[in-house]
Image (cartoon, grey):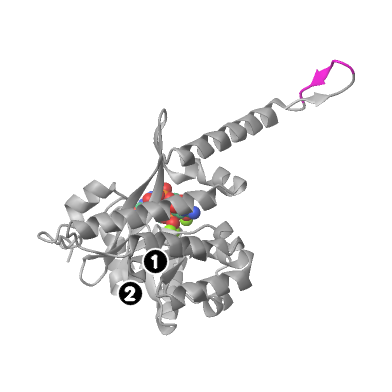
Amino acid sequence: RVKKSGKNTFKFYSWEMDDAFLHKVEMENELRYALEKEQMVVYYQPIIDAVSGRMSSMEALVRWNHPVKGLLAPYSFIDIAEETGLVVKIDQLVLKNVCRQLNEWRKRDCTLLPVAVNLSAQQFESAAFLDMLQETMGESALPPGSLEFEITEVTAIKDLEATVRTLNQLKEKGFKISLDDFGTGYSSLNYLRLLPIHTLKIDRSFIRDITDNVEKRVITETVVSLAHKMNLTVVAEGVETKEQFYFLRERHCDKMQGFFFSKALAPGALEQRYLNVQISPQIGEFIS
Ligand code: C2E
Ligand code: MG
Ligand code: MG
Ligand code: MG
């Protein structure tokens, strides 16, 4: 980026800013192109029922299959996608892919489990979301129970009224809604009361330290019992160890997700391991 200062002279005001700016423009163009070429792929991470140890649903997580850089996780592009509004298109592409995949699994007689899709705040800024959803679902004729949606608190409060309205419409249509990353935003109890949600996902940063940090342990226990009193299902995110699993199960956390069970997998790998009706594996069966 250059600044004109007088006749035929150009002044760079900051090399760093220039670099950052160029990087952003480059990324934005690449992202736009990637979306056009549908370079985004969806990975699926199992969510496990704490009591039975069986997979009860899964979360769809976007990956960018970059032609040069390889498979990229969301942290390397989701911020720029948010800033440029392209995240709305990413979410739509993910939704389309998920619907297509669910139909594939249905055709092949796989175990059918609900898929949770992440939605960005910007999705609720226009009324187009519900139409798009209707259209995508209609094309694939999936029952609403096959999809769930995850929103974060930050998403929800950007425009609380619009969010509550949209979520209520989703709920009426039979979709389930989860509040993601709980504990990292405002975690206001009032939002828990106002938002029509079914599930609370306790953020990984609490789960990571539950076995050796008293405060995080107490907070986690309290959130579980509060959620249950409000008839919400509780999912613990980022469960990585046996100790965390035991702790959470003893405290009646309903579901768990984390590397202890499985990382997010490509659809083929997931199908082979977990969706084969003949095998119907109990992911936590080695734990008990
Ligand atoms: P999230 O929705 O909270 O998803 C969970 C993230 O935690 C995933 O990271 C998952 O791979 C990771 N994770 C799961 N278990 C463990 C564990 O035991 N240990 C550790 N260290 N990490 C674990 P991922 O796939 O990199 O996604 C990061 C974030 O990007 C997501 O957080 C979500 O906020 C966003 N994201 C992903 N896909 C989409 C999408 O399609 N649309 C939108 N808007 N955002 C998405
Ligand atoms: Mg999520
Ligand atoms: Mg989360
Ligand atoms: Mg997150």
Look at the image and tell me in which quarter the N terminus lies. Answer: top right
SS for dot 2: loop
Q: Quadrant of the C terminus?
A: bottom left
Along the line of sight, which residue is nearer the eye, 92 or 273?
92
Q: Residue at x 41, y 56 (%)?
A: 95
Residue type at mark 2 is Arg
Q: Where is residue 105 shown, x and y percent of the image?
A: 23, 57
Q: Position of residue 133 (x, y in %)?
A: 45, 62
Q: Nearer the viewer, residue 210 or 128?
A: 128
Residue at 84% across, 16% down: 9
Disc 2: which residue: 251
The quadrant in which residue 261 appears is bottom left
Q: Tell me what residue is drawn at x 30 percent, y 50 percent.
A: 263
Mark 1 lies on a secondary structure that is strand
Which residue in the structure is indicated by mark 1? 148
- Mark 1, other Cα within 10 Å: few <14 / some 14–19 / many ≥20: many
Front residue (pair 209, 134): 134
Say if 16 sits above or below 248 in the image.
Answer: above
Q: Identify whether 131 is placed above or below 44.
A: below
Which region is colored magenta? 7-12
